[in-house]
Amino acid sequence: MTELRIAFTLNGEPCEVRTEAHRTLLEVLRARGGVEVKEGCGEGVCGTCTVLLDGEPVSSCLVLAARAHGRDLLTVRGLGDDQAPHPLQSAFVAHGAAQCGFCTPGMLLAAYALLRDHPRASRAEIRRAIAGNLCRCTGYTKIIDAIAACAGGAARG
Amino acid sequence: MPAAPFDYEAPATLAEALDLLGERGPEARPLAGGQSLVPLLTLRLARPRLVVDLDRLHELRAVRRTPDALEIGALVRHRALERGEGPLALCPLLQEAAALIGNTRVRTLGTLGGSVAHADPAAELPAVLRALDGAVVLRSTRGERVVGAGDFFVGMLTTALAPDELLTAVRLPLPSPGAGFAVEEFSRRAGDFAVVAAVAVVELDGGAVARARVALAGVGPVPARLDRLEAALLGERSGPDAIRRAVADRPLGIEPDGDIHASAEYRRHLAAVLTTRALERAAEAARGAVV
């Protein structure tokens, strides 16, 4: 068993943790209080544990924590909060795009990465971008509506 | 479930990685993008004593063009294939196939070499390798060997890789500039592995088929080439009628097993339908290509 010290940037703040090499990024983030990162399937299928690793969406359950060393991580907590919500977060509220809310952090981060690269993404592109993020409540329509409402160049990037 | 504990090394050079595999190969697993291996670890279906993380081996991220082939480093990610970055654009079939893999997060991290070495029978990239008569470069402290796709895939999740060997690159011969490609697949849910996938490459000469290649995933333990169909298509007209007739006129020579996802009969049905669609679309692309 290998013990590691890993240092990364988490939502803009420097962060250092000691961990064992067999721990995933999801385990390490939750162990240090990052409960906004949700564990769903644990095998990379559902998208609830999505974080942005150097800006790109990844399943934190499928990344060994060691791989975060020296990298930049964004969780939904870094996107905005109730005092200063990101436009996507506001749009999710306005469109009723969350029910139980478990998929919402992953949805927001997948949508954020899409709109950063494609600010005017079409509904088809939105559907494709969140195809790997499962929601068992909403039927997706309101989620797509909320993202589409930000896809007019309004989303910060 | 957390993975069972293991030793972890992240060598900085290929030589160091090969030394590690040379010493501890049978108890070690190389980690590329992790999109297949990490779930195997956390499900404890794989319990290596040592994980050799390849992430620092930038030498395995290069793409080189030789006069008639692409040599693609094993750590080139699906995202780069999907986007057709740099010389990868010379093989648009890779773009089409990579876009069908898993979900956007899998494509962010997953690698060509990892997919090929993992050898899932339903995966797209091994079928692409088989369709293009590709080969893999295998390195160890004992040296280097190049193995053709037909010999590399041995069985389900099983390849010709020896425990001390690392797949360092994939070689894909470039089809002629006028070749048409298509990948057709059916999966039950977005992001699932295909039940069956068909990869077709068609080259024409004056409207007739000069060369046709078809590889299928999901119809057996390894990607299958449809040799008999390919031979039957030679010299045929490339229109939809001729292709449909050629597929319908003969057994495809596959023997899929039924499983929880699909019966053997349904897989055979899908194979014929998807082969037809892929050949039609590849032939149409070849007819439209400006040579």
Image (cartoon, coloured by chain):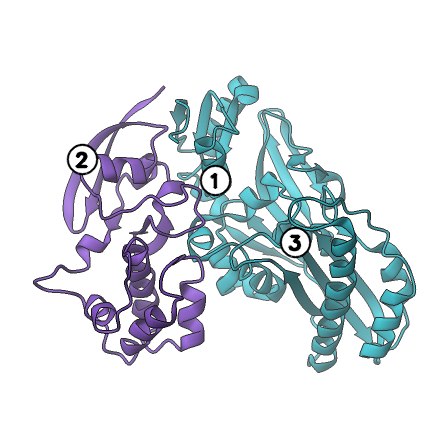
Chain colours: A purple, B cyan
Q: Which residue is mark 3?
A: B195
Q: Numbered disc 2: what chain?
A: A
Q: Which amino acid type corresponds to the residue marked 3 in the rendered image?
A: Val
Q: Is residue B218 above or below residue B185?
A: above
Closest to the observer, A61 or B80: A61
Q: CA distance from mark 2 to mark 3?
A: 43 Å
Q: CA distance from mark 1 to mark 3?
A: 25 Å
Q: Which residue is mark 1?
A: B32
Q: Are marks 1 and 3 on the same chain?
A: yes
Q: Which amino acid type corresponds to the residue marked 2 in the rendered image?
A: Glu
Circles 1 and 3: CB atoms closer than 8 Å: no
Q: Residue at x 18, y 39 (%)?
A: A33
Q: Residue at x 44, y 42 (%)?
A: A43
Q: Is residue A105 left or right of residue B28?
A: left
* Within-10-Å neighbours for mark 2: few <14, some 14–19, many 20+: some
Circles 2 and 3: CB atoms closer than 8 Å: no
Q: x, y (%) of residue A110?
A: 34, 60
Q: x, y (%) of residue A132?
A: 44, 57
Q: Numbered disc 3: what chain?
A: B
